[in-house]
């Protein structure tokens, strides 16, 4: 029997396994082939940018991003495009540009060798058996079971574990769509595009070596394909080169509207990262929340190895405050009139010399 089973080996799950793997018997399950990646295997839909908050957390974890994970160009500028107000501004912000799959594989490589890691595995279900938990998962078409003391969901926005635990979903969800285009000359900035005809959130473009990623967060009730096609047409009109499409993927995205929507689990079943709802409601940045929630749960288990959920709630007080503060900031970004006033003022913006 395992002490802790973690569903998901992304930044949240891999960090938790790294912090606890030498102290407890830990099992990690992930649907991706993160140890020996192969062509055509499942990829996470992510822009692959490490924002300043996540950079700070990597520093606190004593980690430096290896060169083989980086892709060019490294970005120092956000190009903000407001379609309705017909305005454009540039703001300084430093992002580390990465290959997300290589980044996740690197984090997995840091997990202690004492941890059992099984990739290409689909988690199916769990059942409580007294103080133990029976888990069921599928590998290569066959069903397997294991017993564990604690079960941790780090399986993202569309967390099967959270849905089985609560039977509910977040009030505000999106489908993110990303398409990769081959380009001859890339742009040296990350673009944030605000267009009410496409989304009440935002769209983006991110350069990756010889590719440009175009993405959008669109509400599921909308015609997602039509909205995404409209985005591409508008971007072409803005001068973006979107000729040769290379690949396209999608995923669910949560947007917590208040801290009460965060759900950290129940009893010995706990949630971290976006599975719990830890993600910025203004920018959809999730890496820093993944690291912070993993650290909070690791400290909670160390402090109370029998019933850590109350400790975990206490240790995530700062994260809930962060979600609250981000929602206070949201109107300055997503209310059309207020955004126009902020952008027109030129506050914190900079001029670009070409």
Image (spheres, helix red, strand yellow):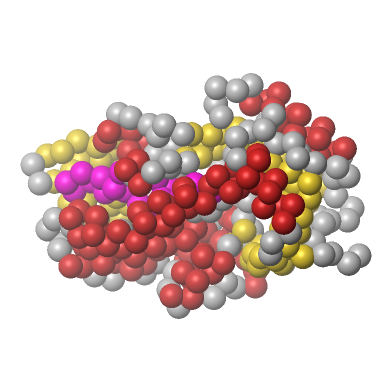
State yes or no: residue 273 in magenta.
Answer: yes
Could you say which is closer to the camera, residue 351 or residue 255? 351
Residue 125 in sight here: yes
Q: Position of residue 182 (x, y in %)?
A: 82, 47
- In this rendering, is residue 255 above or below 314? above
* Residue 328 appears left or right of 74: left
Q: Position of residue 330 (x, y in %)?
A: 53, 47
Name the residue rendered at 76%, 29% in the picture.
Answer: 230
* Quarter location, residue 316: bottom left
- The image shows residue 221, relative to residue 317, as above or below, that is above
Q: Single out the residue that lies furthest toward the bottom.
A: 62
Measured from the top left, where is residue 235 in percent x and y? 81, 39
Rendered residue at 47%/41% (across/down): 255
Q: Nearer the viewer, residue 293 or 160?
A: 293
Q: Residue at x 71, y 52 (%)?
A: 343
Q: Nearer the viewer, residue 235 or 96?
A: 235
Res. 206 visible in picture: no
Q: In the image, what residue occupies the spot 62% across and 55% down? A: 48
* Residue 131, image x, y percentages: 10, 46
Asked if 239 appears above or below 234 in the picture, the reply is below
Q: Is residue 42 magenta?
A: no
Classify residue 85 as left or right of residue 26: right
Q: How many marks?
A: 0
Rendered-image quadrant of the C terminus? bottom right
Q: Is residue 225 left or right of residue 89?
A: left
Give the magenta part as a residue range: 263-282
SS assignment for the magenta stretch, majority: loop
- 304 with respect to 63 (left or right): left
């Amino acid at each position: 029997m395992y002490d802790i089973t973690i569903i998901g080996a992304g930044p949240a799950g891999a960090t938790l396994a790294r912090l606890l793997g030498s102290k407890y018997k830990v099992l990690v399950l992930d649907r991706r082939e993160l140890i020996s990646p192969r062509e055509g295997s499942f990829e996470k839909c992510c822009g692959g940018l490490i924002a300043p908050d996540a950079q700070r957390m990597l520093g606190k974890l004593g980690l430096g991003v290896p060169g083989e994970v980086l892709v060019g160009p490294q970005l120092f500028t956000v190009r903000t495009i407001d379609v309705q107000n017909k305005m454009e501004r540039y703001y300084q912000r430093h992002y580390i540009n990465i290959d997300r799959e290589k980044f996740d594989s690197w984090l997995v490589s840091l997990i202690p060798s004492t941890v059992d890691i099984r990739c290409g595995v689909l988690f199916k279900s769990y059942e409580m058996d007294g103080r133990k938990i029976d888990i069921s998962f599928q590998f290569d078409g066959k069903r397997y079971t294991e017993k564990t003391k604690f079960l941790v969901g780090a399986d993202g926005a569309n967390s099967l574990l959270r849905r089985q635990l609560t039977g509910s979903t977040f009030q505000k969800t999106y489908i993110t769509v990303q398409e990769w285009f081959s380009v001859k000359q890339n742009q040296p900035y990350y673009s944030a595009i605000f267009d009410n005809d496409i989304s009440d959130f935002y769209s983006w473009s991110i350069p990756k070596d010889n590719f440009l990623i175009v993405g959008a967060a669109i509400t599921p009730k909308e015609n997602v394909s039509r909205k995404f096609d409209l985005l591409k047409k508008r971007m072409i009109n803005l001068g973006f080169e979107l000729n040769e499409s290379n690949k396209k993927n999608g995923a669910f995205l949560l947007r917590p509207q208040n801290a009460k929507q965060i759900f950290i689990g129940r009893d010995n079943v706990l949630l971290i990262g976006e599975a719990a709802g830890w993600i910025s409601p203004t920018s959809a940045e999730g890496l820093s929340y993944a690291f912070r929630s993993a650290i909070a749960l690791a400290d909670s288990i160390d402090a109370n190895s029998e019933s850590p959920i109350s400790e975990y709630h206490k240790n995530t007080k700062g994260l809930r405050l962060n979600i609250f503060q981000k929602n206070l900031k949201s109107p300055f970004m997503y209310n059309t009139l207020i955004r126009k006033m902020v952008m027109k003022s030129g506050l914190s913006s900079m001029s670009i010399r070409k």
